[in-house]
Amino acid sequence: MQKRVLSGLLSAFLVAGSAQAADDLMAVAQDFFKPIPAKPPALEGNPASAAKIELGKMLYFDTRLSESHNISCNSCHVVGMGGVDLQETSLGQSWQTGARNSPTVFNAVFNLAQFWDGRAADLEEQAGGPLVNPVEMATTEGHVVEQLDGIPGYHEAFRAAFPDDTDPIRIENVQKAIAVFEATLITPNAPFDQYLNGDETALNAQQKAGLQAFMDNGCVACHSGINLGGEQFQPFGVVENPGEDLLPPGDKGRFDVSQLPEDEFVFKVPGLRNIALTPPYFHTGKVWDLKQAVRVMGTAQLGIDLSEDDVENITAFLHSLTGDQPRIVYPVLPPSTAETPRPNP
Ligand code: HEC
Ligand code: HEC
């Protein structure tokens, strides 16, 4: 595994090096990275419609999907806060905390898989997880259906979203609707997108120096593509173990999914879009300062003690990844009735 990673890094160095000779930063950047598209991507087997997106939005905000009726997707992925909760690890059912930091839902549609260990293939599969996770929303699939069925306003909303379905209030459709809504949570038009689209003035001199350093030092070997990440699984601590605080021995990452020895302490490379908005960092959420996260990456992943100039410049570049945040109109949710199942706090 180490060998494969390192040879990948090496080829990235070489590409970055030869490009430097060509002295065309923008052209090299355009090879490694892609702008966020203006429109949400289509999901395979789950076509979007206005009614389905609206239903997905209602479900995303509806706390009645949780056992306690206190927690919604938005509790841990707040759409007004970069799609995260700004906590080390999230608070769920009965004040329990999970083991990992809540990643952003923004631009998650572009990731090769979902969760830090990639255990869900896509957004649709992912949306089933938190509902039944005992430290998150702590309910059961059966109860989600019973709950929604007990709220009359949802009958019409599900019929409109799934017009060909004779029995639309089903857990599969809950997941499909949430997924099409989440696919709309993209953040185009960051200064870096404007730059990739040809606007030389969109990045300032320090951000350009940071982009150069990001490529020259080899960050780009793992953080590339639309999300500057989200496309590979890699060990945390390729060169140097970042220590028990950041990489506790109890969480072996992708190993728990695959049981393959080479997957020990392997995690999905997180995307870096809007990274300035989403502290704390890493799957443990132990690092609050983006500059410190950059330093850790230098030593742990690359075996480099980055110079303070590089750290400052790379961090300035990372700030250019903040795009237009989604403007979400808070949905009016259908009322409960006397027959609607009650919360179980
Ligand atoms: C109690 C907090 C909490 C709630 C509620 C919650 N999540 Fe999460 N979410 C997390 C955490 C923590 C992770 C990372 C878990 C892991 O990787 O093992 C996560 C991961 C995700 C991811 C993966 C993103 C990526 O890049 O890998 C998506 C998408 C997501 N949640 C969407 C949702 C949706 C949709 C809901 C509502 C149905 C929801 N979450 C409810 C905390 C929460
Ligand atoms: C070998 C692959 C690899 C290289 C090279 C690499 N990273 Fe990472 N990066 C990762 C992985 C994997 C994680 C997730 C670590 C964890 O928390 O488990 C990560 C996490 C991060 C985070 C925190 C993201 C978050 O949402 O918490 C930042 C910021 C980051 N990297 C920036 C950089 C920078 C800057 C460089 C170059 C100095 C770099 N990375 C080099 C793989 C890599």
Image (cartoon, helix red, strand yellow):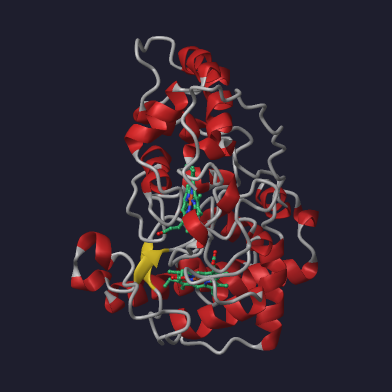
Q: Name the residue rendered at 63%, 74% in the picture.
A: 288
Image coords of residue 17 (percent x, y): 53, 74
Image coords of residue 281 (percent x, y): 56, 70
In front here: 152 or 315?
Answer: 152
Image coords of residue 11 (percent x, y): 40, 71
Residue occupying the far front of the picture: 338
Q: Name the residue rendered at 66%, 65% in the picture.
A: 318
Q: Is residue 128 above or below residue 254?
A: above
Q: Answer yes or no: is residue 107 visible.
A: yes
The reply, left or right, for residue 71 in relation to residue 195 is left
Residue 202 quadrant: bottom right
Image coords of residue 263 (percent x, y): 26, 69
The N terminus: image quadrant = bottom left
Q: Name the residue rendered at 76%, 71% in the picture.
A: 206
The reply, left or right, for residue 34 in relation to residue 98 is right
The reply, left or right, for residue 122 in relation to residue 311 is left
In front here: 309 or 175?
Answer: 175
Q: Is residue 312 above or below residue 176?
A: below
Q: Answer yes or no: is residue 18 visible.
A: no
In front here: 219 or 295?
Answer: 295
In front here: 96 or 46?
Answer: 96
The reply, left or right, for residue 134 in relation to residue 312 is left
Q: Is residue 186 above or below residue 89?
A: above
Residue 5 quadrant: bottom left
Q: Name the residue rendered at 46%, 87% in the picture.
A: 303
The count of marks equals: 0
